[in-house]
Structure formats: C-alpha cells, structure tokens
Amino acid sequence: MTPNQQIEMHLLHVLQEDTPSEYSFGYYFPFGYLVTATGYDLEIVRGFMRSMRNRGLVQYGTGFQEDGYVSGGGYTLVPAGLTHLRNLREEVRNEKQTADDVSARNRAEAVSWASTNYR
C-alpha cells in the first residue's frame, strides 16, 4: 500500500466512523474537523479530499442556515468511497497475511539452516 493510499484510507475511515448512526450517507465534515481527526496538515487534507471528490469517492456540499445564508461546507462519504475503503482495508489484510507468511517461511528456513549447519 502506498503512502497516498494510507492517507486516503485514513480520511475515508474518519468519514465512515464519525458519521452519526442515523445517517448512512450525507453527513458532511468540514476541513477543520478532518484536520483535527487525522492530524494531517490542512493542505494535505484539502488536496486528498478534492482528489477523492474528482474520482467520485466523496461529495462536497454546503449547509444553509434558516435565513438562507451559507453556514459552511464539507465532505461526505458516498457509496463508491465506501467500496474503495473496503478494498483498501482488504489490501491491508492481504499485505499483513503475506508478511506473516514470509515471516513464518523465514523462521522455518532459519531453523532448517541452523539445524543443518550447527550439528
């Protein structure tokens, strides 16, 4: 997994996990919240969120007050983003399994080598 994929996964995870339970999609988070929740700089969050918006993984929306004035804007997770998040999580699980398999194979080879060379 690339560093960019890790950042995307972290941002999408925040959008999914911090959305109140009464919303499946459509709860919008402003940049400030995402910066605080992830610890990334504003420029990083802004760039990644715009990239994911352009790819259809998140949606940008603005909120309005009762008097019609804009009260702010933010990003929400959309179904394609949830699918992408699940794929990234699966990739992490596969990488961990591969690393565990390699580690077990290396241990077995080391034991075999040691038993052969240190009799």
Image (cartoon, grey):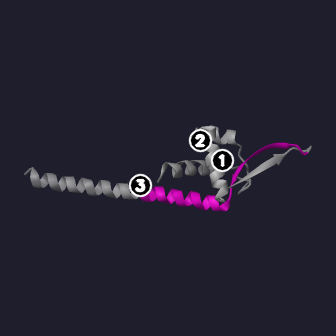
Q: Earlier in the sequence, mark 3 or mark 1?
A: 1
Query: Is 69 inside the magenta-drawn segment?
Result: yes
Q: Position of residue 116 (x, y in %)?
A: 11, 55
Q: Is residue 15 visible?
A: no
Which residue is the site of mark 2?
38
Main SS of residues in magenta = helix
Whole-percent x and y of residue 87? 54, 61
Q: Is residue 94 left or right of residue 104?
A: right
Q: Name the residue under label 1.
A: 18
Q: Nearer the viewer, residue 49 or 63?
A: 49
Kindly identify the amino acid type of the residue bearing the numbered disc 2. Thr
Which numbered disc, 1 or 2, marks the residue that appears first in the sequence?
Answer: 1
Mark 3 = which residue?
A: 96
Alpha carbon distance from label 2 to label 3: 23 Å
Left or right: 17 in relation to 2? right
Q: Residue at the spot x=48%, y=52% of the render?
A: 2
Q: What residue sits 39% from the left and 58% below the top?
A: 97
Q: What stretch is highlighted in magenta?
A: 68-95
